[in-house]
Image: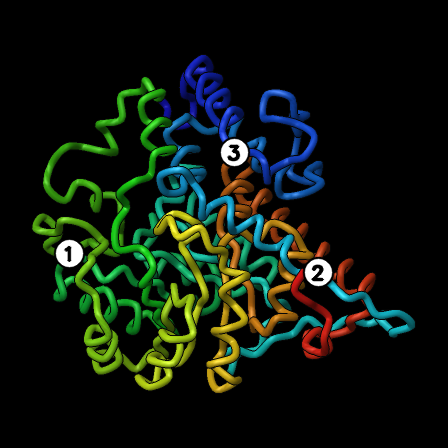
Amino acid sequence: MNAFSGSASSRRRFLRYLGASPLLAYSSTLFCADEAPELANAAQALNVFDLEAMARRTLPPAHFAYLATGVESDATLRANREGFTKFHIRARRLMDTSKLDLRVRLFGTEWPTPIALSPVSSLRAFHPEGDIAVARAARARNHLEVMSTLSTASVEDLMEARGAPVWFQLYPTSDASVARALVKRAEKAGCPVVALTVDNPTSAGRETLARGRLLDKRDCTGCHAPTPGASFLRKPMFDGLDYTRLRSSLTDQITWDFVRRLQDMTSMKVVLKGIVTAEDAAIALENRVDGLIVSNHGGRGEESGRSTIESLPEVVAVAGGKIPVLIDSGFRRGTDIFKALALGADAVCVGRPYAWGLAAFGQPGVERALQILTTELEICMRSMGAPSLAAMREGYVQRA
């Protein structure tokens, strides 16, 4: 069965399940997936939630559930959206915003926008062109891209499609020798930064994903064979490695000692993805980490009930401008991005919005998601009287 066909009845059952859950409370405001207007092309999407609705229409239940899931009751997933309501923007008047400056410099490279693409695993589950389509979209709009360890394209092919270096996100795996091989391959390919994920030691507790799988009646053994290491078969970064002994790409045994060993094994800048407290930010500085990404894995890695936007100020305060601080998880609007930048983030990473665009329309959908978010950020900067990222730091956001 085609991976993108799925049963219409099972999809409707899954949509009814989502509709009865709190997951949709912070999605599209007027329409549920069955009622939202069907779009003929990516250009018709007014916001990223339109792309989400089209992704729901397009994907089989298990694949959309993989994107939608949080942990257990999805409290952290919801908190990531609710958190933005706890900060207000203080609009300034009579400021010249006829020319906006969105440029940001990260590790010596200047980007025209502070919006970056977070790593998303298994992108070919959402569209046949997967990671390559995303890389081409990032190239077309010139955004920083962070590739996943579990990419469905090799780092070499992805770099060619992107036309520029990408950052490499590292899952440490349950085998240190495999982690070393992944790092060495990314470094050889020209990745300037390795982003070590520290916020997702287990994939347990993802109930929305489990429900989606139950509703999916396709024969999925072609991609998910029940054999040792089968989950790595379609992940080119593991080609040539002995992955049959791997229990998982994740591990709950990672400590600060691994961070130090990672620094010793590579010349790439080492960024920690998943720091959400002042205490851990301070330890990161003590260990000479090069940068931080404030993240809770989009609500997929923990059930803390705390949003990343609420975590950001204490991490920024400890970093003190010594190292760059990025953030992800829950960003859906230009106002969300504005708030994070005003609170001190150097850049904002988005994941689900561009994956929705990919599922709905392939590369044009990814480009449309990035265009929407960039345009919304520009509108917010103009309406709030902030002509540049530097200007945003001057008291534009307050706690509600």
Which residue is located at x 56 percent, y 68 percent? 347
Q: Tell me the crowding category of disc 1: few under 14, some 14 to 19, or many 20 or more residues within 10 angstroms, Cα based.
A: few
Q: Closer to the observer: label 2 or label 1?
A: 2
Q: Earlier in the sequence, mark 2 or mark 3?
A: 3
Identify which residue is drawn at 55% across, 46% down.
353
Residue type, label 2: His
The residue pinned by badge 1 equals 240
Q: Nearer the viewer, mark 1 or mark 3?
A: 3
For this orientation, the residue located farthest to the front is: 400
Residue matched to label 3: 22
Dividing the image into 4 quarters, which one contains the N terminus?
Answer: top left
Are dots 2 and 1 in contact, CB under 8 Å? no
Spatial CA distance of label 1 from label 3 is 43 Å
- The residue positioned farthest toward the left in the image shown: 245
Q: Residue at x 37, y 84 (%)?
A: 285
Q: Between 393 and 155, which is closer to the camera in this rendering?
A: 393
